[in-house]
Amino acid sequence: MIELTIDGRAFHVPPGVSVMDAARANGIDIPHLCYHPELSTPGGCRLCLVEVEGRADPVPSCQLPCAEGMAVRTQSEQLSAMRREIIDLFVSDHPLDCVICDKAGACLLQKYAYEYGVSETSYDKHIARSLYQDDNPFFVRDHQYCILCGRCVRVCEEVVGASAIEIVGRGFDSHVATPFDGPMIDSSCVFCGSCVQVCPTAALMPRSRLGQGREWDLERVETICGYCGVGCQIEYALRDGRILYAQSTPGAPVNGEFLCSKGRYGWDFATHPDRLARPLIRRDVAYRLGLTDEPWELPDESPLDTGEGVIEERFVPVDWDTALHVAADGLARTVQAHGPDAVMGLSSARCTNEENYLFQKFMRAGIGTNNLDHCARL
Amino acid sequence: MKDGAMTAKTTGGPAGQIGQDERFAAVERVMARFDYQPHGLVEVLRAAQEAYGQLPRDLLVAVADKLDVPLSKVYGVATFYDMFTLDPVGETHALICTDPVCAVKGGGDVLAEACRHAGIDAPGGTSAGGRTSVRAASCLGLCDQAPAALVDGRAQVDLAPGDVPALLRGEASPARLQVRGEPRILTGPIGRLAPTDLAAHRAEGAFEALAKALGQTTPDEVIAQVKESGLTGRGGAGFPTGLKWAFARQAPGEARYVVCNFDESEPGTFKDRALMEGNPFRVLEGLILNAYAIGARTGYIFIRGEYPAATAVIERALGELYAANLLGEDILGSGFDLDLEIRRGAGAYICGEETALFEAIEGHRGHPRAKPPYPTQHGLFGQPTVVNNVETLAVIPSLIEHGGAWFRQWGTEQSVGLKLFCLSGHVKQPGVVEVPLGLTLRELVERFGGGFDGEPQAVLLGGAAGGFVGPDGLDVPLTHEALRPLDVPIGSGAVMVFNRSVDLWQVLESLAHFFVHETCGQCAPCRLGTRQMLSLIDRINLGAGSEGERDRLHRLGQTIRRACACGLGLTAANPVLTYFQHFEPEVGRPG
Ligand SMILES: Cc1cc2nc3c(=O)[nH]c(=O)nc-3n(C[C@H](O)[C@H](O)[C@H](O)COP(=O)(O)O)c2cc1C
Ligand code: SF4
Ligand code: SF4
Ligand code: SF4
Ligand code: FES
Ligand code: FES
């Protein structure tokens, strides 16, 4: 362990940890725009500069490894003045549209402009980029708000492995682009939305939330993604009970900041009219059991046919207890009459690993058959 | 590639939609030379730009595929370097310098006349039918013959608007080497011996130091002599050379590399070009000694993209050295192997910064890396690397021949040895001057520059990254210790003299343009701050500038200087800050 002091407090950290990470782990927030805990730290925003005893010039804490005996100051009059100057420069290239911006309340630049009291730039306003790209169903790219922190480029390369985007051009004229500035769909993008997740400003925004409300208007619900066994944690942002967009939560144990395209964008089924909201029992079975008064005969054509009104005609909604009872009863009778190998179990990739484990245990130990498979094999 | 840094691949993927013609074959040959490794990207794109006069989209797709580099990265590299264009350049492509020295000598008029002559609205355009394209260029390293231009690789100088038709045909005055000084140790043979006549140079003692080192001096003793000499880097940063070599020798690594930094792009600097075009063997001998001292088996010479003439000289010189077993395997029977390779830049001042230079050699955008780790620990391809300036290397053979102490007969305790200065602007005989450190600017100009041309108003020392001194600085000795209180560096050795006819705010504006154009853009204070510096200077030049704006500019300069990652940001505000210090000292002072 290495011992160092940050703002006069002594800390013990393992070797290799940056001053930024050590400070954050101990509740000291050092201003940052380009740093992201899951990504490499090229150190471009320079907001995280700190003073280190014995060094003449300030050092970016996101790139500074903790060292034995190091004494770091994250706050001083000089640092505040410098950070204020840097924010002033950022704002000279960024429209302060906060009153009409969907990201207001969650934008990091706004946060620091507030904290350092920068209401508008003291320089001429030179907005380097003006491109607005609305070329895919999932997110929009509004370059005027881009601060070139590079997080999107790094997440796409380092975490997703897609390398769909890159900082192109040079200097003041740089911007984030797909090859030849073409539409996202022509790039190697897999539409995971990770770039949108890590963008600190309104430059990358979920299309579905545009104009739908601001941070403080949204309700947030945490849940587990229903798509696969990985079990990523998802946070839905809702307004009036409608999902506006999905994002991951940084502390999620399984997935951290990341989600795949299904989890992030495939939630419109939640309120789809075709969605099954209750267990259903086939009408002929329900009639036999006295759960409905209307008889019905299984037709010859495919029972999977799902035309208009077909579900209502062929099925009867019941509560969970009834549904489970009917299923258990049917299984038991079949096993009694024909032996355990007369049934088979097929489990789902949408269930968690734990649920799949229990299911095979049930089939093998409970029913007594090895007739077992899983949809992910198909 | 002879080193083991990368594993070999034998062939790339399919070529995509690009036509399989002679032009593609030229690009393919370069890819093959790099075993289709991604690090060849900048050289591959240079070959493509030369073959096609542009970087066609399908070609970039094919290159990405064959080198197995994401297309987004290829696009990022293709848009980073000035010499790469996605649209076709003209059959005749003219780069006309508009940096400070050319600007005060009428470069702007030449540029305007070239556009008019070619029928182009503004610089950057291409004439109808694609005949001619004209660009404003950053300093071309021909400042002693300003105004200067590069047309299809041909350097032409001393231009006046009337020369434009000849210029565009490549028939205006060709560039020459102008070297003076006393003593002429580093530059001795320039103008006297054919640059690549190896026998003639050996007859005057070239490569005797190498033979001596390989025969009877251990690498540690070579380093000891370099340390003993007190030599410090001539590329601008002034780090002690022997110490740098010792660090790299001690650092653990699978391979070690030496790099000769010949990216010379600092405005007002042209000494490295003189050495390489006129006396390349001395520099190469220094580089070979450097490799021997630190145990490198591979070395690179990174040449500024806009120096095609020097590139040709070095190519010939390397051929001579391989033929004479001064390079390659078992050099002079000593058991020491070394390969030297040329890498050309593609138009980016920032790639002179040593870590950005590594990025360029590795096939990336020229973004400087964070330091530490320093190059001597973790440099090119992640291995211990020594980067030295051309002039630094040119000193080395003499240190081995005469012993390190020999170098201390010149200069002062803290500023040792001989130094090349680049005299340009308002002096009667501009050119490269080799002198001991410690002369004053006035002595330099009067003894070796034919005297001042008009009454000197200011000297910009060290180039765009350097600083201004006023007339009272003319009698300060050119040593680190004497210049420190003036806050100006010797830097690259650029000495740009401006007489009273020059509006220094116009010079500041031109320097601000330079930095806006050349910042890599990685750091926000540099990317945005250089742009706002230009904006404030523009306002002041338009007469709209209040005292408040001068103070604002001063404060901005201090922020950029302290908040940025690399030497470019560190120095971008130097001209402005030293201007205020020496010409308007009341600015930025409280009360
Ligand atoms: C923006 C920038 C441009 C530079 N350009 C050059 C150059 O063209 N040639 C050079 O030798 N050094 C250049 N340097 C300095 C190099 O980073 C490095 O310090 C030098 O090559 C080391 O060699 P030396 O110790 O022999 O001077 C530049 C530095 C910066 C920050
Ligand atoms: S959506 Fe995912 S794959 Fe597409 S650019 Fe963003 S991070 Fe890369
Ligand atoms: S789009 Fe967002 S994440 Fe990407 S560089 Fe711009 S501000 Fe940063
Ligand atoms: S200081 Fe400027 S040139 Fe250097 S890395 Fe930062 S942005 Fe690039
Ligand atoms: S957070 Fe460290 S430089 Fe941006
Ligand atoms: S060549 Fe024009 S300023 Fe150097």
Image (cartoon, coloured by chain):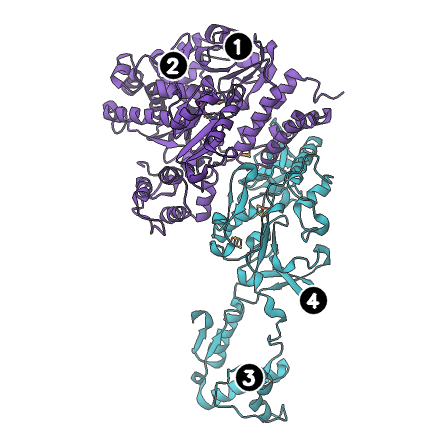
Chain colours: A cyan, B purple
Q: Give above or below for B77 relative to B265.
A: below
Q: Chain of mark 4?
A: A
Residue at image mark 1: B453
Quarter residue A86 falls in: top right
Rendering coords of residue A14 (x, y %):
55, 42
Local crowd size for mark 2, using a 10 Å CA cut-off: few (<14), some (14–19), many (≥20)? many
Question: Does residue B475 show up?
Answer: yes
| Alpha carbon distance from label 4 to label 2 | 79 Å
Rendering coords of residue B499 (x, y %):
57, 13
Quarter residue B166 falls in: top left
Query: What is the three-letter code of the residue carrying label 4?
Result: Gly
Quarter residue B149 falls in: top left
Residue at image mark 4: A241
Q: Is mark 4 within 8 Å of ligand 2?
A: no
| Alpha carbon distance from label 4 to label 3 | 33 Å
Q: Chain of mark 1?
A: B
Q: What label does residue A327 carry, if any?
A: 3
**Residue plotted at (59% across, 94% down):** A295
